[in-house]
Amino acid sequence: MKNKILIYGAGGYMGKLFTQYVKNANMPIVLGSRTALQSSEEVRQFSLNDVDTIAAHLNDVKLVVNLAGPFMNTQQVFIKACLQTNTHYIDISGETPEFESALAFDLEAKEANIMLMPGAGFGVVPTDIASKMAHEKLPDATHLKIAYITIGGATRGTLKTVLKDIHREGIEIVNGKSVKAMPAKSDFYFDAGGKKQRVVYNPWRGDLVTALHSTQIPNIQTYSNFPGFVERMMKGKLLWLRNLILNKLINFLPVGPSEKELRKGKTFVYAEVKNQHGKTERINISGPEAYVFTAQTLSSISKKILTDNWTSGFQTPAVYGKDILLSDFQNVSIH
């Protein structure tokens, strides 16, 4: 009987952090990586160049947790291998193309009786759940705004993902369809920890896809908080600085947040729905530092899957409701 979790990308910053969480929860794990790892746990070293090679490592694995980005390069080949071996799949992708890519495998996943859930970390889990909760308060909502703010550090991988296409157009959802939208085209303020914070339009976020899937609200926008110089990059300015960071400076930055930043960091999520009569409902979620939050949500979702609490096909985190935010953790607040 399959009962193992394969953590691929276990040697990276998020891989090491998540591994510690699942070890503390006594979940059976196997560590996977492109390169050799030194660990007391079972280690499987393999590349992602060939579906059959990957599948050979999954025959005794119930769940793959893919933490190896960029996910547009690793997600599809892993999902194809999981379809062969009837292995569930989750990852921490956060941009719209990755969700659209995973959604394309929905029917095949249902036929293989497995669940696919991209975006099982902070960047999507609380926003998707907040969106669903807000929609439940106002079932006839026609518009949804989602925003988040993070206080803490960032990994090099996150910085590369955010900065590489910082000024390029993305999307918003208008009348149920994806339409082109430019970054930082609009802004608003919401209360985050007792202080009004400004967020700007972020057109690449994966929760544009997940919120549409989980709520069917036809008009959706997503916002994030960025430093002023990053917002200028979003508008096509200071791109020389973006290039300098990506090409030279990034290798001198810390691999990820320090222990102090992990302890002291915070996150704030906001979802606002409105109907055609102008009635508005809101949900606020506050929680720990973003990478800690990700390790927690990955652990909670993994535990659900190991205990056979899952739904086949492409799913978003809202399928589990707020339970995956509150059941194991005391540092998340919803109001």
Image (cartoon, rainbow, N blue to C red):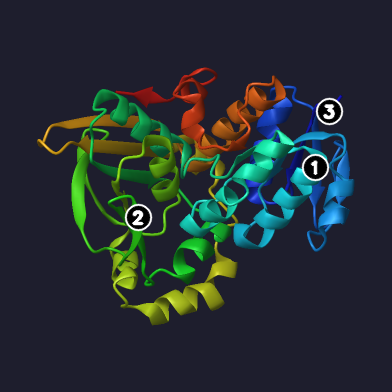
Q: Is residue 234 above or below residue 216?
A: below
Disc 3 residue type? Lys
Residue position for label 2: 177
Q: Is residue 199 above or below residue 21?
A: below
Vertical arrangement, residue 304 with respect to residue 71, above or below: above
- At 44% across and 23% down in the image, what residue appears? 322
Please tell me which residue lies in front, 222 or 267.
222
Q: Earlier in the sequence, mark 1 or mark 2?
A: 1
Write down the quadrant of residue 281 in the picture.
top left
For mark 2, give the secondary structure.
strand
Where in the figure is residue 295, as x and y percent of width and height? 58, 36
**Disc 1 marks which amino acid?**
Leu
Front position among marks 1 and 3: 3
Q: Nearer the observer, disc 3 or disc 2?
A: 2
What amino acid is found at the position of numbered circle 2 in the picture? Lys
* Mark 3, residue position: 2
Residue 131's image quarter? top left
Locate residue 215 relative to residue 245 in the image: left or right: left
Mark number displayed over residue 5: none
- Residue that extends furthest to the left in the rendered view of this protein: 277
Kindly report the distance in space between the C-alpha atoms of the residues bearing marks 3 and 2.
Answer: 40 Å
Q: Residues within 10 Å of mark 3 (few under 14, many from 20)?
A: few
218 horizontally vs 94: left or right: left
- Among numbered discs 1 and 3, the one appearing first in the sequence: 3
